[in-house]
């Protein structure tokens, strides 16, 4: 069986690329198709596969400004020649599922989320854009939405990375989806003894607006509680300017530094709404509780009162109240670790293999 895996772009290793890596391990002979590939930006597991790019990669400075070429991506996907492939798996968050599968081929889509900047977070992204930019974006994104809905009809079956995303798939594409949680390398994280714990809370991940890092920085600056922030992104300089003396922004760090902070923090602070959210699972795998906004994927990973606490409004007061409740509660590190194991790579592979086999059997029937 010839397998093609379609991924939106290969410019770094984030959650979507970890899913792709697991798929590459499941299908070691598969070919990978993508819009833009920066050699060396992804793992050796992915790099070992034959990787073919669309014409988007040949556009000026595509490796950096690939998102600016979004209106060209539906056409670029349709030009990929997939004749001879029996199974097509599209890894969808940016445009990936819009390929034209050959007759008789099975097309499965693993969806991290319908494109946020086109659907559920359209207005959030537009807030940071000039009036001229919004005028330019509106007709282009209108066109992309039409292409996106049409592309969904070319998929035989969907799998979503969370129940939150499955609801979006139903809302925007009117399709149902199996829920298969993405793979988290939980075995790489280990708890520390209580005497080794620090006196700080931790926030980790990309510093972008929809993740609301500003909420945590402002809350901990106001109270004088210690907060360590690990991660880079468009808001790093802005947050450093507004952070009080109790807040330390370390920027991007090596994996061993991140693991050490996970294991020693009092709790992880997770103030944004995510599709799934790998960071809380990594914190639980390190034996630490999570203080999370009670929306999105965190509600499917964190168990309120057992592995963390939720707050229901994205306000400083609500966040600080949840931090206070977390500090006054007793959390068992072993319960957090046990919960994290539900999201291990082995669980993902088994669930994905069952999804593929069931879909293939449905076609054969």
Image: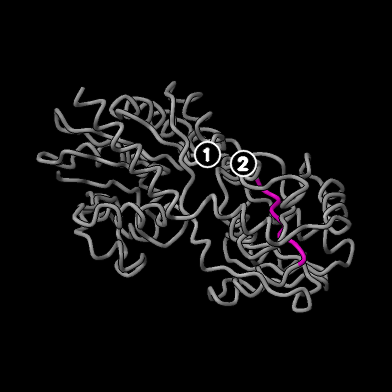
Find the distance from the CA under tag 2 to the CA under tag 1: 7 Å
Q: Are marks 2 and 1 in contact (CB under 8 Å)?
A: yes
What is the magenta range? 266-272
Residue 64 placement (x, y as % from top left)? 39, 60
Q: Which residue is mark 2?
A: 300
Residue 301 included in the magenta stretch of the image: no
Q: Residues within 10 Å of mark 1 (few under 14, many from 20)?
A: many
Q: Quadrant of the C terminus?
A: top left
Marking on residue 162: 1
Extreme residue in the left direction: 84
Q: Nearer the viewer, residue 218 or 279?
A: 279
Is 217 on the left or on the right of 33, as rendered? right
Helix, strand or loop status at disc 1: loop
Residue 136 visible in this rendered orientation of the protein: no
Marking on residue 269: none
Is 70 on the left or on the right of 361, as rendered? right
Marks 2 and 1, the one that precedes in the sequence? 1
């Amino acid at each position: 069986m010839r397998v093609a895996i379609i991924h939106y772009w290969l410019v770094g290793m984030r959650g979507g690329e970890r899913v792709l890596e697991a798929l590459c391990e499941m299908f070691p002979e598969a070919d990978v198709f993508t819009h833009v590939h920066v050699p060396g930006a992804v793992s050796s597991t992915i790099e070992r596969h034959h990787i073919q790019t669309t014409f988007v990669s040949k556009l000026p400075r595509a490796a950096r400004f690939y998102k600016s070429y979004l209106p060209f991506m539906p056409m670029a996907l349709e030009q990929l020649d997939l004749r001879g492939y029996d199974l097509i798996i599209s890894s969808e968050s940016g445009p990936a599922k819009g390929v034209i599968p050959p007759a008789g081929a099975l097309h499965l889509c693993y969806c991290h989320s319908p494109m946020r900047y086109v659907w559920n977070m359209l207005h959030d992204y537009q807030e940071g854009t000039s009036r001229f930019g919004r005028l330019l974006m509106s007709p282009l994104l209108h066109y992309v939405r039409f292409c996106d809905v049409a592309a969904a009809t070319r998929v035989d079956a969907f799998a979503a990375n969370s129940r939150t995303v499955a609801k979006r798939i139903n809302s925007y594409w009117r399709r149902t989806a199996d829920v298969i949680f993405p793979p988290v390398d939980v075995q790489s994280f280990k708890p520390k003894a209580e005497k080794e714990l620090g006196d700080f809370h931790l926030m980790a991940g990309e510093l972008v607006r929809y993740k609301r890092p500003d909420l945590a920085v402002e809350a901990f600056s106001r109270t004088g509680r210690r907060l360590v922030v690990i991660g880079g992104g468009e808001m790093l300089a802005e947050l450093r300017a507004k952070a009080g003396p109790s807040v330390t922004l370390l920027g991007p760090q090596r994996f061993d530094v991140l693991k050490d902070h996970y294991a020693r923090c009092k709790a992880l602070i997770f103030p944004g709404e995510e599709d799934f959210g790998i960071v809380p699972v990594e914190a639980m795998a390190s034996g630490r509780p999570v203080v999370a906004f009670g929306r999105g994927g965190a509600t499917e990973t964190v168990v309120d009162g057992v592995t963390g606490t939720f707050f229901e409004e994205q306000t400083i007061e609500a966040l600080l109240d949840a931090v206070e409740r977390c500090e006054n509660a007793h959390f068992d590190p072993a319960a957090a670790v046990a919960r994290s194991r539900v999201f291990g790579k082995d669980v993902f592979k088994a669930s994905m293999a069952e999804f593929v086999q069931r879909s293939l059997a449905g076609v054969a029937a």
